[in-house]
Amino acid sequence: MLLNRKNRMTAYLLILPAAAMLAIFVLYPMILNISLSFKDYSMLKTTTKNVGLKNYVTLLSDKRVWEAVQRTFVWTFINVAGALIIGLGAAMLLSNGFKGSGLIKAIVLIPWVLPSVITGYIWSLMLQEDAGVITYILKTLGLVASDFSWFRTGPLSMSAAIMANIWRAFPFFTLMIYAKINTIPSDHIEAAMLEGANSIQLFRHVTFPFIRPTVYTCTYLCFIWSFNAFDILKVMTNGGPAEMTTTMSIMVQREAFQFFEISNASTMSVIMFVLMISVIVIFTLASRLVRRVKK
Amino acid sequence: MKKFKEPKPKSALAVGSRRISVGHKIVLILFSLMLFILIIFPFYWIILSSFKNFLEIFEVPIRFLPKRLDFTNYKEVFTEYHIGTYAINSIVVTVSTVLITTAISTMASFSLTRLQFRGSKAFVKFLQMSQMFPVVVILVPLYLMCTRMGLVGTKSSLILPYVAIQIPVSVILLSTYFVDIPKEMEEAALIDGCSLFQLFFKVMLPLATSGIVAVSIYTFIQVWQEFLIASSFVRKSIHYTLTVGLSTFKGEFINWGGLMATSVIIAIPAMILFTVSQDFFINRLAGGVKE
């Protein structure tokens, strides 16, 4: 009844600003990005010409690009897995409703609200070679050699950044999963308990099937965030040492804003986007297939 | 219009927990202690380090408690660094973004939830997709566009992309509030002869205020900490926002004390806003992020 003709016009007028902003600053850049990837465009040169697939051929035959792709996947996988495990564990823990769980619930989002750049810096400080509190404790306990440093080799630098990133990402899992666990009907649990299910069986057959959709959604979101993550890596390692922590985001940003190789950056970001979408599509199809087979 | 009930303090699983043994309980307490330390320690360390001077940062053995509350770092970041300027930049950029985003999104979500017109479902789908859209992919063309429009070096070069990027989430979250307003309200208003505009401004807006405030806070927290666009687009240091300005503490040596004091300054607004709207973060966000 709200929709007579005049009102219909108003309805469109009201979404117009939102639609226009998205069209100009999200959709159009996306298209521009693709078109740039077929051009030879650099801020250092004055001419622009079409080069077809040349950028793609050059980049995809560059070993450094493939290494960055690999690193991005390693980085993403460990981050998502880590955040999922800790996040799920913490949610299960909180759902026991012990004394003090209220306090933890109130503070659990702190890592998530703290600006990511700050997360990067504080973990850099805590892992710092001489004065970092974590390194210091590890050294005092004799767990690492006295000249140990997190930021000298690639894998260790990567682990350092991953720790910071997991710390930031897991509360989201905890909160979402905890909220879902709270909605499990208590008769489900009671029935399972009556039948003598132990806590592992309870988790496998009652709790997990119930929270599965939430776990999937969170994993999906965390995948997208980690895959495109920039802030923490930039602050903590800046891609170093010797490019050993350069993921695709870091590479795109550097190509564009340090080397001004616009076309390279565009091409790389298109590759990155295609890879991300492919992973999502493959996983969606795979999970559908699994579900169908199970039925 | 809060229809959300607080989750029951004892969850369903807690029913079972009463039967657990003492050993279990100790494990539980240990784990929750670990979780507590994991969450709070880095945060504590920021605050502690902000009171330490250059030598104390590197002092071994490490002190876990502050010797004294030394506010020198807090003074120095304003006198010897330009944190004041960056703070003003950040405030201007963030507040403008929040105001514009909220205005645009409120209109859009009113239209989407209340006037289900043709194409509204498709638009919601489009919003949900663009909500996931990675910024890295449009970073380069955005910069070129800003160059062409002559916006580089102005605050608009940050505000405009921020608004566009924040709109999808903002509309989706706001819609969850508008949907909650009972249909009878608008019917009654229309029977009383309200125009659509009166309905929007006199009936809907007041009813959705708590939601609008909460979503604005969410947008604020997001934009306040933005780093990728700000660090890429801003060239001159007088235009730095706070997150970018943190890099000015990196010289030959890193001034960790100053850096941490600034971090506290940056974190405070986000933390305060988060605390006052915790209910939103815990109840709504879960509903909004999931499609």
Image: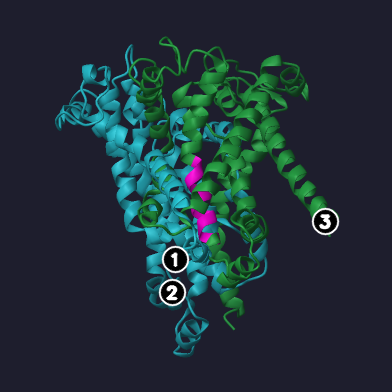
Q: Nearer the viewer, residue A170 or A140?
A: A140
Left or right side of A163 for A127: left
Q: Earlier in the sequence, mark 1 or mark 2?
A: 1
Q: Position of residue B254 (x, y in %)?
A: 32, 18
Task: Using the numbered discs, state the Cα–Cα distance from disc 1 to disc 3 in whole angstroms.
Answer: 34 Å
**Depicted A136 relative to depicted A18: above or below:** above
Image quadrant where one finds the N terminus of chain B = bottom left
Q: Which residue is mark 3?
A: A294
Task: Using the numbered discs, state the Cα–Cα distance from disc 2 to disc 3 in whole angstroms.
Answer: 47 Å
Q: Position of residue B181 (x, y in %)?
A: 48, 76
Q: Which mark is residue B10?
A: 1
Q: Nearer the viewer, residue A159 or B272?
A: A159
Q: Check disc 3 and give the amino acid type.
A: Lys
Segment colored magenta: A169-180
Which of pointers 1 and 2 indicates the residue nearer the eye? 1
**Tags 2 and 3 in contact by the CB under 8 Å rule?**
no
Q: Residue at x 37, y 40 (%)?
A: B37
**Tags 1 and 2 in contact by the CB under 8 Å rule?**
no
Residues at marks 2 and 3, common chain? no
**Tags 1 and 3 in contact by the CB under 8 Å rule?**
no
Q: Residue at x 57, y 15 (%)?
A: A243
Q: Check disc 1 and give the amino acid type.
A: Lys
Numbered disc total: 3
Image quadrant assignment for residue B61: top left
Magenta region, main secondary structure? helix
Say few, some or many: other residues with alpha carbon within 10 Å of mark 3 (under 14 / 14 to 19 / 20 or more).
few
Q: Chain under label 3? A: A
The cyan chain is B
Q: Check disc 2 and give the amino acid type.
A: Met
Image quadrant assignment for residue A49: top right
The colour one sees for chain A in the rendered image is green
Helix, strand or loop at label 3? It is helix
